[in-house]
Image (spheres, rainbow, N blue to C red):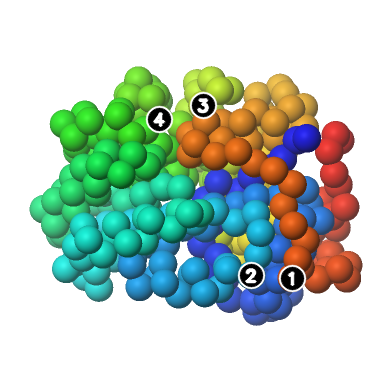
């Protein structure tokens, strides 16, 4: 069976306001109605992880991860390996992250970011779980730390990739996957599409990074897992591949990257009513193959 996976989302940050879903249950129903069967919900601090787990617990098809985001060091700067290890022990916690470096928004915390990222790479190797890496305006330091701390050994994914081909090549050489968000659909994102052209099919994943970065044609809305379908179809068209085939490829890549096996998820706790809105009518009810 073909699955479609949102490989990176922040379900605990969805607002459930406006014209979108009114609850996580409805968001899950909207996702299923658009063919999105599985998702990876990402926490950026240990406190965020605890809150997220309470929210997603009733639903099947959701994996989770935990890390210390470089932009959350002010609130989580005193984190310990022991605390993070407790989160990573959960049976559905399949990765360490989101971690990495961000000099675009927080260049003043560079030294603290470098220390935190290095410690998390080491911990990922210790527990043998892949990394989810955020990198913005920090190409050379990111790759240098990945090499120095043997990130190749645990592997992982460069999430929401928005750097250049050179960095993509270096990360691919380290065995990492490249995940594309709605940014790939933005008019001004020629650099991301250049990377998309370069990255081979067996290293591509798709994501929403919701509630951020909603793809065209819903740009400007709060993003949600259902909208990964738009990104998937854009990527498929760009790579001259059928959407159903791209769904198969990206779900297989997800399984290989995170060492999991996908299966048909339960519909328990998901509303049965038609929760489609005009914003997703073009996607709702579209199964595979298509």
Q: Nearer the viewer, mark 4 or mark 2?
A: 2
Q: Give the alpha-carbon distance from disc 4 to disc 2, as whole Å.
A: 31 Å
Whole-percent x and y of residue 131? Answer: 36, 42
Q: Give the alpha-carbon distance from disc 3 to disc 2, as whole Å.
A: 31 Å
Q: Visible in this render: residue 288?
A: yes
Q: Is residue 77 above or below residue 175?
A: below
Q: Which residue is mark 2?
A: 58
Whole-percent x and y of residue 217? Answer: 71, 52
Question: What element does badge 1 sit on?
Answer: loop
The numbered mark at residue 269 is: 1
Question: What element does badge 3 sit on?
Answer: helix
Q: Are marks 2 and 1 in contact (CB under 8 Å)?
A: yes
Q: Are marks 4 and 3 in contact (CB under 8 Å)?
A: yes
Q: Visible in this render: residue 106?
A: no
Of label 4 and label 3, which has the lower sequence position?
A: 4
Q: Nearer the viewer, mark 1 or mark 3?
A: 1
Q: Which residue is mark 3?
A: 203
Mark 1 surroundings within 10 Å by alpha-carbon count, few (fewer than 14), some (14 through 19), many (20 or more): few
């Amino acid at each position: 069976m073909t699955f479609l996976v949102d490989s990176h989302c922040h379900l605990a940050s969805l607002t459930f306001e406006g014209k979108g879903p009114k609850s996580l249950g409805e968001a899950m129903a909207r996702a299923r109605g658009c063919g999105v069967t599985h998702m990876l919900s990402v926490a950026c601090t240990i406190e965020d992880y605890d809150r997220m787990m309470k929210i997603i617990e009733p639903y099947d098809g959701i994996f989770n991860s935990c890390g210390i985001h470089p932009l959350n060091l002010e609130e989580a700067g005193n984190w310990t390996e022991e605390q993070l290890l407790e989160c990573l022990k959960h049976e559905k916690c399949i990765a360490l992250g989101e971690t990495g470096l961000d000099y675009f928004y927080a260049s003043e915390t560079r030294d603290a970011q470098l220390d935190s990222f290095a410690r998390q790479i080491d911990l990922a190797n210790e527990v043998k779980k892949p990394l989810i890496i955020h990198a913005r305006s920090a190409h050379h330091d990111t790759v240098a730390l990945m090499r120095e701390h043997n990130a190749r050994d645990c592997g992982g994914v460069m999430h929401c990739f928005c750097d250049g081909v050179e960095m993509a090549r270096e990360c691919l050489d380290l065995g990492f996957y490249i995940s594309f968000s709605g940014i790939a659909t933005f008019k001004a994102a020629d650099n991301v599409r250049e990377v998309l052209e370069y990255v081979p099919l067996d290293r591509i994943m798709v994501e929403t990074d919701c509630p951020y970065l909603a793809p065209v044609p819903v740009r400007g809305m709060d993003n949600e897992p259902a909208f990964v379908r738009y990104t998937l179809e854009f990527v498929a068209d760009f790579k001259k591949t059928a959407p159903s085939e791209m769904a198969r490829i990206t779900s297989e890549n997800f399984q290989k990257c995170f060492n999991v096996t996908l299966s048909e998820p339960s519909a328990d706790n998901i509303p049965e009513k038609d929760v489609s809105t005009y914003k997703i009518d073009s996607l709702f009810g579209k199964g595979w193959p298509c």
